[in-house]
Amino acid sequence: METDLPKFDSAFSIDFVIFGFEAGELKVLLIERNQEPFNDWWALPGNLVENNESLDDAATRILFELTGFRDMHMEQFHTFGSVNRHPLGRVITVAYYALIRIIGQKEIRPVTQYAKKVSWHAINELPKLAFDHDEIFESSIQKLRRRLGYQPIAFELLPEKFTLTQLQLLYEAILNKKLDKRNFRKKMLSYGFLKELDEKQKGVSYRAAKLYKFDRRKYFKIFQNDLNLES
Amino acid sequence: METDLPKFDSAFSIDFVIFGFEAGELKVLLIERNQEPFNDWWALPGNLVENNESLDDAATRILFELTGFRDMHMEQFHTFGSVNRHPLGRVITVAYYALIRIIGQKEIRPVTQYAKKVSWHAINELPKLAFDHDEIFESSIQKLRRRLGYQPIAFELLPEKFTLTQLQLLYEAILNKKLDKRNFRKKMLSYGFLKELDEKQKGVSYRAAKLYKFDRRKYFKIFQNDLNLES
């Protein structure tokens, strides 16, 4: 460790786990660091919170600086505070996650010089990450898995119109296991929140599949308001 | 503000929202502070995290010091970081919530001198709280309300054997609205996770009602694993 680095008695940072889905794979956005500690390592996008900014303001600023994204829907999911998680001193980090549609996004570039590169990585092929970011990532994917059961997470990641194969690949990626095709389709269609379109995939070399849309209103009617008796 | 108080450049604390249910009312555990700032005010139990302890260790210590509780199931739900939330400097706070059965708990006493008193307060009759604790409390009750739809929250707060009236009062307290008795019973019994016991309330002056138990295994079978296709 270099000795001219600043030391923190107590500081706080924000880190982002940004999920996207592309070409049948669940991906996460990583930066390549360009400073110590962990120079040259891959890490979750994140940085220290300034003294004069709220957590939410800091989240907006840091996300923009590292990825160029603005106004993304983000949600805090956990704050990590092991004593030795940061080599320069005591730093706790507030972790946020976000789900975005990769399709239609232009190339992502860091706006500031805090990162060399920023790019999508398939979650099954992640490099070893800086700090405790492996643990933060693992915690976020657990959260995603649990929320898949009661929040319309899949439909935030898919394009507006999608095939049942795409939907199944996404579920398999999040749950990290193969699902039976016939059962999956039967179950998904039985809920009534998938709307079959009078349209098929375009520009594919194999037999074009039917496209579907997600009916958010029906989804919430079925799942969200059941046990809490709001309906 | 007195000038001999310590100032924080950046520090972090933990605050607890501890819910209990007693005599048909949803309650929260508050302490009466015995030091500046907010001397004599009611507040959520909480304190600063020491430099050499992890968040989880600090949570365990602080909870014990202020309430005498050990080994309670707690869950982080949000970290609050407005710039001016603490009059002595920059302090962000990690908020945890817990659900406990009040019945059978002995009287609660602060173990240390950080609080004058600790006592249960009905959530509809809360005093104005110190710091941003009104906001933290409000955020916790919103969270509780949402989770009621997909987690067995009610059954963590009720005694092991309960009547349908107790269950309805608890739902009404969390949702902050009256529910129709006939519809509530019909819906709750239709799920199949309430087990009717061959036993009635004891020691009541009115007609004794039937007692029920919660079947956790059935609950999870029905609600948790539906959309995520684990079943």
Image (tube, coloured by chain):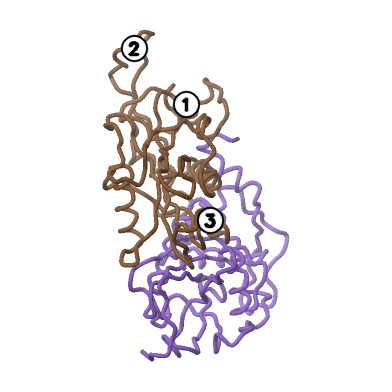
Chain colours: A purple, B brown
The type of residue carrying mark 1 is Gln
Which dot, 2 or 1, sits closer to the camera?
2
Which dot, 3 or 2, sits closer to the camera?
3
In the displayed structure image, the side of residue A177 where residue B103 appears, left or right: left
* Residue that carries the numbered disc 3 in the rendered image: B87
**Which one is in front, B25 or A225?**
B25
Label 2 is found on which chain of the structure? B
* Residue that carries the numbered disc 1 in the rendered image: B168
Residue A60 in the image, given as x and y percentages of width and height: 62, 69
Q: Is residue A85 above or below residue B32?
A: below
* Residue that carries the numbered disc 2 in the rendered image: B204
In space, the residues marked 3 and 2 are separated at their CA atoms by: 50 Å
Q: Tell which circle, 3 or 2, labels the residue nearer the N-terminal end.
A: 3
Q: Tell which circle, 2 or 1, labels the residue nearer the N-terminal end.
A: 1
Q: Tell which circle, 3 or 1, labels the residue nearer the N-terminal end.
A: 3
Residue B10 in the image, given as x and y percentages of width and height: 47, 67
Is residue A223 visible to us here? no
Which dot, 3 or 1, sits closer to the camera?
3
In space, the residues marked 2 and 1 are separated at their CA atoms by: 18 Å
